[in-house]
Image (cartoon, rainbow, N blue to C red):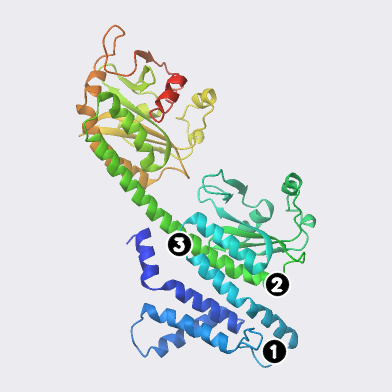
Amino acid sequence: MAVTPEDAADYLSRTNFKSIIELLTAEAILHRSEDPVLFCRTLLDQKIQARGGAAYAPEQATEYVRQCYADASANADENGRIQGKASSTTGAADVDGLTNRLALLESLIEACRTIATKLDPMEATQAIINQTLKVLLADRATIFTKDPHSNNLILMVAEGARNIRVPIGKGIAGSVAESGVICNIKDAYNDPRFDPSFDRETGYKTKSILCGPIKDQNDNIVGVLQVINKKDDSVFSDLDAEMLTILSTQAGIALKNANLYLQMENSRQKFRSLLDIIAALQSELGTNSLIFTMTQRAPKVVGADRCTIFLVDNDNQELWAMQGEVNIRIPKNAGIAGEVATEGEIVNIPDAYSDTRFNQEVDKKSGYITRSILCMPIKAGKEVVGVIQLLNKDEGPFDEEDEEVMGSFLSIAGPILKSSNLFQSGTGKKAKSDEKSEFPGGSDLSVPTERTKDKAPMMPAFGEDEDEEEDDGGF
């Protein structure tokens, strides 16, 4: 059975799972077991045994955490430092190290708690960075997330900003993403992986770097957490590396939860957008507004950048679209849109430039870069009455969910489009320049194709900004 984002979010909330993770983290730091996996299993066995066969209650996890903090406070000395449950044979140096570790316990747990409350991906990212700087007393920190669609890490600078990409295996962050091993660099300029160009451009001086992998629940690397320069100009210690490992684990959980929440919100937004566009199509739209409404709102349903709608003219064996002041026509079997109109099947291209059906010449002329394409038939019953072509999804290629959502929309739009005056006037004859036409385009333009290459120019998108498209003239 497939697990939806809503199911996952409900499970985490219903079982109070975050408190269980917080308990295991706090107890592990207090006891400092050499085998944390065995320790966690033993601890959980003790909790299960103490229940005496009773069923698990979510509020128990909260009580476990409260009791852990109470025990830690009871072990605090006169200076408020928490004394761990270390062996009496521990040496003086180890005791000092343990004291330092325990001194970080409260701030670390507070950091984990703060991070766990953020569901928005950008807020979660910022919380992880802020808490990491606080716990490790560092100057700067960055989070790279792994792009599931390419072999790159993405540095999320800010919401809406263009993301910076780093190839996996390149540089310090890239090498950590590739190896999965934490990296503690005492002197950045003595490490051949370090790129000093950023320092030269900004005047910033990178001295020490601590970089660790962020992993998901299946131990897959999903990102990298990189920290730069201790505030006291010292280097990062082994203790700092241990703290970074814990923070990275919490970061993996937080980012996963945030992404699940984002998927859920995106699904809701798609549903709302779909309802809006269906309501608009079923309202009393004028013929000039029908296709404009479709091209304006359809991209929002799947997060596309551009949209073009072609109508099928079977009498003239052409596809035509309104573009500014011109009705543009191309042969019905030309290019990707022609294939969809002829075959009646979906064409989903994740990488346009690697597909031989895509004509790159239009991109070269316009300066636009086409990355992904979703081209779908618009049907009324079994008849293909048009084609919708969507370009460049916000993140990654178009997926099966996009196809399903657009399919639901097009199943309603197809019959409405066929019954419109716009479709009835556009099929079977071309608009004549001396006739009064209901089309916004005043004249026809036939676009020839390179039949020797079996390609047709890709149609530019329209409908998102009428004034802008009129200036473009269609190409």
Q: What x and y, as percent, mark residue 303? A: 41, 42
Q: Which residue sits at x=52%, y=48%?
A: 159
Instruction: Quickly name the residue at label 1.
Output: 90
Marks 3 and 1 close (CB-CB < 8 Å):
no
Q: What x and y, as percent, mark residue 17? A: 43, 72
Which amino acid does the dot numbered 1 rest on?
Thr
Marks 1 and 2 close (CB-CB < 8 Å):
no
Left or right side of 135 for 436: left
* Label 3 crowd bin: few (<14), some (14–19), many (20+), radius 10 Å: many
| Lower position in the chain sequence, tag 2 or tag 3 | 2
Quote the CA–CA distance across marks 1 and 2: 18 Å
The residue lying toward the viewer, choosing from 201 and 76, is 76
The picture quadrant where one finds residue 36 is bottom right
Q: Is residue 424 above or below residue 352?
A: above
Q: What x and y, as percent, mark residue 55? A: 33, 83
Q: Quadrant of the N terminus?
A: bottom left
Instruction: Quickly name the residue at label 2.
Output: 238
Q: Is residue 432 above or below residue 214?
A: above
Secondary structure of the residue carrying numbered label 1: loop
Which amino acid does the dot numbered 2 rest on?
Asp
Outermost residue toward the top? 434
* Label 1 crowd bin: few (<14), some (14–19), many (20+), radius 10 Å: few
Instruction: Quickly name the residue at label 3.
Output: 257
Quote the CA–CA distance across marks 2 and 3: 29 Å
Q: Is residue 235 above or below residue 285?
A: below
| Lower position in the chain sequence, tag 1 or tag 2 | 1
Does residue 455 appear anywhere in the picture?
A: no
